[in-house]
Image (cartoon, coloured by chain):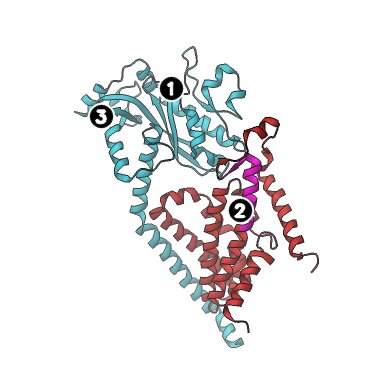
Chain colours: A red, B cyan
Amino acid sequence: MLNDSSRYKEILVKGIWTENPVAYQVLGICSALAVTVKMSTAIVMSLALTLVTAFSSMIISSMRKKIPSNIRIIAELAVIASLVIVTDEILKAFFYDISKQLSIFVGLIITNCIVLGRAEAFALANNPVDSFVDGIANGLGYSLILIAVAFLRELLGTGQFFGFSVIPNCIYDIGYQNMGLMVLAPGAFFIIGLLVWLKNSLSGISHEKR
Amino acid sequence: MSDKSQDKNSKKNVIIFAIILSIVCSLLITGAASGLKSLQQENMRLDKKINILKAANLIKNNQKPPKDVILKLYNDHIQEVFVDNTGKTIDKEISDALHLYFYKTDNKINGYILPINTRGLWGKIQGYLAFKNDGQTVSGFSVFSHAETPGLGGEIENAWFQKNFKGKKILNSQNKFVSVGIAKGKVKNLPKKIQDHYVDGISGATLTGQYLSEGIKSTLAKYEPVSISFRQKKLKAMDIHQNKE
């Protein structure tokens, strides 16, 4: 039996790197396309998703002995959806500006496969604290890919970083142009594909080898 | 263990669990929604005021002054008015009255602000378009609610897009109404003589631009009587003042 801290470390490494939700499990791709045009939106989405995954996993895990298995998916979704809606209401009341920024992302969180995926794959079989750590780990793993994609898309697509122009004008004068493709959804597909390739060749784990 | 899991999955337990979960979830959501409603509505009202002030250029686009400053600016400079279809201000709302805001300093009207309410690609776009008191020059644009794709159509809420509206004309050189629209691409690539009626488009959000252009045009057409009154300098501060008394 592993002690607590090394078990948490293992869960974290698994979620963030070896079994990264986007690069390894290929979950949450839809939102990774939608919100990665700019760094700022990607970071807000990452933060929101990490928190929702962590808390929904924890709540579902604490009910895992009570949830009847034939309606478990509906029960999990009810918990996730309620949690997201309540969060949204609280944001609207106390952090109106942030809630305006999040706008459509809040809805996207409910439909994000990572949240349900972690509830199904981990929370139902583990204790609440482990599930919370697992939610954080997978949220961070998602964030890692999302922010990397957003960084590349914003830089290549608009020549900006957090909305500030970073590519000097002299490079444009030589003939450099922003890549229009990067602003559109297909640009995200290419980058995610390349990142999956990079990640799998770095860690030496791929679905093919198994 | 098998006894217990059998028990957990019995019809009775499934139904009880489903009912309890539904009740808890709906109570939670209802509680949050109704308990926080007044706070949310206050935020929304304040946000509307901020956007009216932004359209009128009374606050800068990236600024967020404290609440009392906003309310003071709003009370000092913005007046909600109703105008009939001949372009005269009227006392109270009649069925086809036009609803707008005057931007005034003391008793002088500096301009007027029209509410824009149009469909976008995914949902309604609500915002404000402000004009100078010549009845044809746009002085500002702001959006307070939309559901466009973040990063693409969602850019309509950002300063770089909104500031391009400033100084655009809704009349052409023959003084005919042409509205102001969102170009497909950059304005500098358009023929020179129509550049005054377009703002830079957003790449990847052609449809949002198209719907917003249509919405602005139909709104402006509806409010033409007001604009005409301003062009003919019929609307003066005293008009409203007398109406109020």
Single out the residue that lies furthest toward the top: B174
**Magenta residues?**
A144-162
Q: Position of residue A52 (x, y in %)?
A: 52, 63
Residue visible at 65% across and 51% down? A149
Amino acid type indicated by mark 2:
Ile
Name the spot of residue A24 as percent of width and height, x first. Answer: 70, 62
**Residue at image point 41% right, 33% down:** B55
Q: Tell me the element at label 1.
A: loop
Q: Which residue occupies 50% across, 74% down?
A: B17
Residue A173, image x, y percentages = 67, 30
- The foreground one among B28 and A9 is A9
In the picture of the structure, the residue carrying the numbered disc 2 is A147
Cα distance between the residues tagged 1 and 2: 41 Å
For discs 1 and 3, the disc positioned in front in the rendered view: 1
SS at badge 2: helix
Pointers 1 and 2 in contact (C-beta within 8 Å) = no
- Screen quadrant of the C terminus of chain B: top left
A88 relative position to A74: left or right: left
Residue B101 picture quarter: top left
Residue type highlighted by circle 1: Thr
Residue depth check, mark 3 versus mark 2: number of the one nearer the observer? 2
Query: x and y percent of residue B75 in the render?
Result: 27, 36
Q: Residues within 10 Å of mark 1 (few under 14, many from 20)?
A: many
Which quarter of the figure has residue A113? bottom right
- Closer to the N terminus: mark 1 or mark 3? 3
From this viewpoint, is residue B9 visible? no
Q: Which residue is mark 3?
A: B91
As shown in the figure, which amino acid type bears the numbered disc 3?
Asp
Q: Quadrant of residue B138?
A: top left
Residue topped by disc 1? B137
Q: Is residue B61 visible?
A: yes
Q: Is residue B26 left or right of residue B84?
A: right
